[in-house]
Image: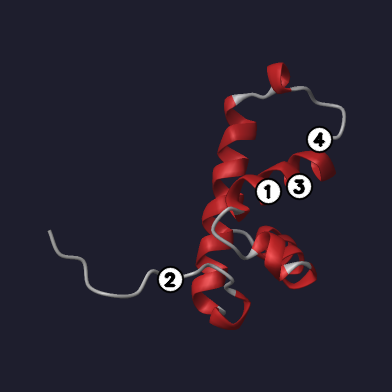
Amino acid sequence: MSDITSEWVMDKIISKPEKFGGFRSNPLIMLEYLKEFYPDATIAELTPQHMSALSTISRTKNKLLKKNPNLDRRKRIQGNFTL
């Protein structure tokens, strides 16, 4: 993970922790990345390289949230599960 990627992801999480720090935040942060870095691209133009970058953004976000639990807005399921 590059420092630039980490900085961009952390800036997004800090700017809107409810949006980018929750369970449903992976597609939101990936869409934000596409809008910011590829504003003229359409879905049909996305290449494997674009998809790889999106995966990196998603993984980076999850790692940063793990390292910064104060920004993590994902709800943890608590309790015992029995079958």
Residue 83 vertical position relative to residue 71 in the rendered view, above or below: above
Q: Residue at (77%, 22%) from the top-left corner?
A: 42
Q: Residue at (83%, 45%) from the top-left corner?
A: 36
Q: Where is residue 52? Give x, y as percent.
A: 56, 38
Dot 4 and dot 2 residues touching (CB under 8 Å): no
Label 2 amino acid? Arg
Give whichever of 56, 74 is nearer the camera: 74
Q: CA distance from mark 1 to mark 4?
A: 15 Å
Q: CA distance from mark 2 to mark 1?
A: 20 Å
Residue 44 vertical position relative to residue 32 in the rendered view, above or below: above
Q: Earlier in the sequence, mark 2 or mark 1?
A: 1
Which residue is the site of mark 3? Answer: 32
In the image, which is nearer the foreground, mark 3 or mark 4? 3
Label 4 amino acid? Tyr
Please name the colour scheme applied to the rendered image. Answer: secondary structure
Dot 1 and dot 3 residues touching (CB under 8 Å): yes
Q: Earlier in the sequence, mark 1 or mark 4?
A: 1
In the image: residue 67, left or right of residue 15: left
Which residue is the site of mark 1? Answer: 28
Which residue is the site of mark 2? Answer: 76
Dot 1 and dot 4 residues touching (CB under 8 Å): no
Q: CA distance from mark 3 to mark 4?
A: 10 Å
Which residue is the site of mark 4? Answer: 38
Give whichever of 70, 75 is nearer the camera: 75
In the image, which is nearer the foreground, mark 1 or mark 3? 1
In the image, which is nearer the foreground, mark 3 or mark 2? 2
| Local secondary structure at mark 3 | helix
Q: Earlier in the sequence, mark 3 or mark 2?
A: 3
Label 1 amino acid? Leu
Residue 71 vertical position relative to residue 55 in the rendered view, above or below: below
Q: Where is residue 35? Give x, y as percent.
A: 81, 40
In the image: residue 81, left or right of residue 72: left
